Image (cartoon, grey):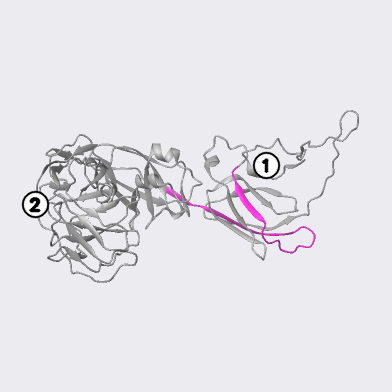
Amino acid sequence: MRARGVGVAAIVGCLAWGSPRTIVEAGGPVRLTAIDRNGHPVAGASVIEAPRQPDGRYLIDPSAPALAVLDDRGVLTPLPTLREATSRWAVISPGRVAVLVPQTTEGATVRLDPAATIVGTLVDERGQPATGATLQAAVADAAMFEGADEWGLRDLTYRVVPDAKGAFLLSIAPASELVWSVVRRDERREPVAGFASGGTITALRGSALAGRVIDLEGATPAAGLTVILRPVTVARQRDVTAEPALPQDEASAIRAVTDEAGRLRYVDVPPGVYEAELSDRRYAFDGDAPRVDASGIAPRRIETWWIRRRASVIGTVVDGLTRLAIEGATVEVAPPADAVTSRVAAVPVEATTTGADGRFRIDGILPGAGYRLAVSAPDRAPVVETIELKSGVVTDRTRILLLAARTVRVTVVDDEARPVAGAVVRITPADRPEPDPADRVSALFVRTAT
């Protein structure tokens, strides 16, 4: 939601000043000067580092340690070094609008105008101070403020840390529009609606969930395993073949790590239905991925989750006549062709290529029967075998023979035996069903020519 800054007031509190550093940052201004709107120097202003955020904005944290302090003439030379290459210098001063330092190699001058002040209180759903949570306020618009573009005011996000009573204060450019969010201890963000200066922001507390993860092999606790909870709407849309996961997917993920007894605990889980996911590809849930309904703030225990080890397949690809190793052959493990509605159909095709010795290995496959092991190489006939992969077992296909492909020459003529140019000829094995265009394995046996 958006709130406008009202009134002009000074910041109450103190800023943490650090020890000045005098290493010149490559590509930055050699001299920095701060003035007020009347052209008078602003002494004692602080230079801080404004890290670049994933959305391209720069974070202004008034509690951040100062890299340097401007002298009595409002001058600093040279500028301090930045820890991150993507960061920007920012200048802050009590009761004044924070600005970004222009990106120039010449001398830079910034104007520090009086700021408007927004005050409020951050509480939980019981009306108590929301300890451990902070606020972020992203500038949505600062069109009415002179110099908004010059000083980068539209590119800023402010970090606000409430005090022990939940009270907070933010100094911004007058007439700025802000979009607020609550940042929890695990860095998850939740949007804020209905806030205006002087009001209250409620940070709803989520569920506390406790459970246990057991390995089917020996019924032993699964220790040190990261289990991720994703909202069902995100889990359904998630592309299982995507690496890495989409940023918005990760932003909504909630993680916990099992202890030596296999126990795991989630705290402050926002209301909703979640689907569990194992981050370690050596394991899979025994059956469908479990789901959790998180509602209310009372601690609750979830069912025990059983996992099993994933399967692996190895082998060697050789020439069918000479028995010499074939390097660079493509080896794929795909679900059964008819597994359209089965859970195994959601498993992506796993692929690799053979090394100089013709050997291959594919790990992290969900155990199951009816998998197709497809092997192909240029100028050779493909081979497809049906295999069963068992939990925690490395299946060795020993040697897979590839024969040289044959060349078929076809002449297309019309009813009067005249050659037809541009005709498309497709050859498929007579003993195989009509190939599915979406099935990469069946497509291996299709050859087309014009």
Write down the quadrant of residue 411 in the picture. top right
Few, some or many residues within 10 Å of mark 2 (<14, 14–19, 20+): few
Circles 2 and 1: CB atoms closer than 8 Å: no
Quadrant of the frame with the N terminus:
top left
Give, as a three-letter code, the residue at label 2. Val
The magenta stretch is 306-335
Q: Secondary structure at mark 1?
A: helix
Few, some or many residues within 10 Å of mark 1 (<14, 14–19, 20+): some
Tell us which disc is closer to us: 2 or 1: 2
Give, as a three-letter code, the residue at label 1. Ser
Q: Please give the count of numbered marks on the rendered protein.
A: 2
Mark 1 highlights which residue?
Answer: 442
The residue sitting at 16% across, 46% down in the picture is 130
The answer to which of 51 and 300 lies nearer the viewer is 51
Percent of width and height locating residue 199? 13, 38
The answer to which of 15 and 10 lies nearer the viewer is 10
Q: Residue furthest bottom?
A: 22
Q: Secondary structure at mark 2?
A: loop
Quadrant of the frame with the C terminus:
top right
**Left or right of 381 on screen, residue 221:** left
Percent of width and height locating residue 309? 48, 53
- Queried whether the magenta region covers residue 53, the answer comes back as no
The residue sitting at 75% across, 53% down in the picture is 380
